[in-house]
Image (cartoon, rainbow, N blue to C red):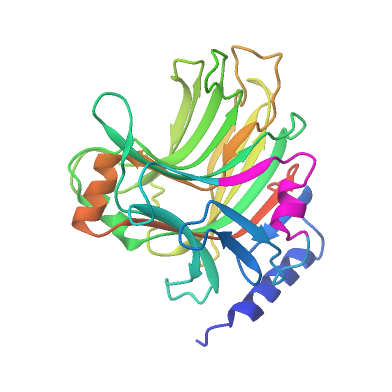
Amino acid sequence: MPTIPAVTRSWLFGLLLAAGAGGAEPAGTLIFRTGFERETIGKPAGCHNDIVGADKSVPAPNDWEKDLEGHPLIGKFVIQFSKGNADDRRARIVDDPTGAGRGRVLEFWMKNALQPTSGTHLKGRIQVNMTKCSPAFNEMTSRMKLFLHPNFRVLEQMEQRLTWLTLKEYWTNPDWGQNLPHFRISLGLAKKAGVGERLYWHLDSTRTVRHALYWRTDTHDRRIWVPIGEWFTLTVYYRQGDAASGRFRIRITYADGREQELFDVTNWTMSPDNPDEQTGMAFWNPMKLYAHEKTFSYIRDNAGPATVYWDDWELYQGDAYSR
């Protein structure tokens, strides 16, 4: 089957977005979209901590500064790293190396995790930080394509269980430097102990400054496994609320077009310890690669650096999840 050129692919992607499956825009208000193509510029070149420009391969809103950072509900965009340099970890816009003909994609690449954590342990982090968002940004939908490098398969040959490998994180009332109640929702990968156990999806929340677990759920008992070595789409919906009104949903669309709901949680999505202070999506990481050094070194030593590719990001205010 012939490969669609990147420019044509991105144009078709934008046209389909504008038309929608039934000829109408999805619910919710589109804030920003990008395929990391034409005139999307990562700075500095060797290891990006910022992205600027306008992705003219898709229709507006497509400008990283004017439409994303300049939106009245959205704050600053920055890419944060753990200690080290570009030879240890990096984020870069690169030509798609997966063979899928996707044009340009954003690469997160982790070789050496060098950030000190508790005791003598180390961890590694690459993440997009969206900060200083408005309290009114209390309902949103984010859709993005991901590709987990085949190197991640080696984790299924690990004897130990895996409980921490975060890919997305959502905060209200973050508590850095302050003794304030906070609330965090984390999406990541997990594995039961034993060689040959498959990776599955894990979603949980923590509350208060002690990072105590509040609610959690996973896909293991439903036998929904993590696709590795193929492109898939995650659609995430967040609505701020209490035990009755808060909602957090995630749907996966596989490479063959099949859709499956991973999670649909109705529960607290803000701090139960400080319910009167509704901060909206105050700090969140729509793209993240975060784990213990032992996890990253196991992948590196047995297969190669842990690498995730991201593409075709759409961000909406409101509910663009339901159809």
In the image, which residues are magenta?
A: 61-78
Instruction: Say left or right for 99 vs 252.
Output: left
Q: Is residue 254 visible?
A: no
Q: Is residue 213 visible?
A: yes
Q: Position of residue 184 (x, y in %)?
A: 53, 28
- Vertical order, 203 against 182 (above or below): below
Which of the 4 image quarters holds residue 133?
Answer: top right
Residue drawn 67% across the image and 45% down it: 141
Furthest toward the bottom, the residue is 2
Task: Give the number of marks.
Answer: 0
- Name the residue nearer the viewer: 281 or 250: 281
- Vertical order, 179 against 238 (above or below): above
Residue drawn 69% across the image and 72% down it: 57
Instruction: Say left or right for 86 vs 106.
Output: left
Q: Position of residue 246 (x, y in %)?
A: 66, 27
Instruction: Say left or right for 320 vs 125.
Output: right
Asked if the stretch drawn in magenta spans residue 75, the answer is yes
Furthest toward the right, the residue is 24
Q: Position of residue 52 (x, y in %)?
A: 65, 58
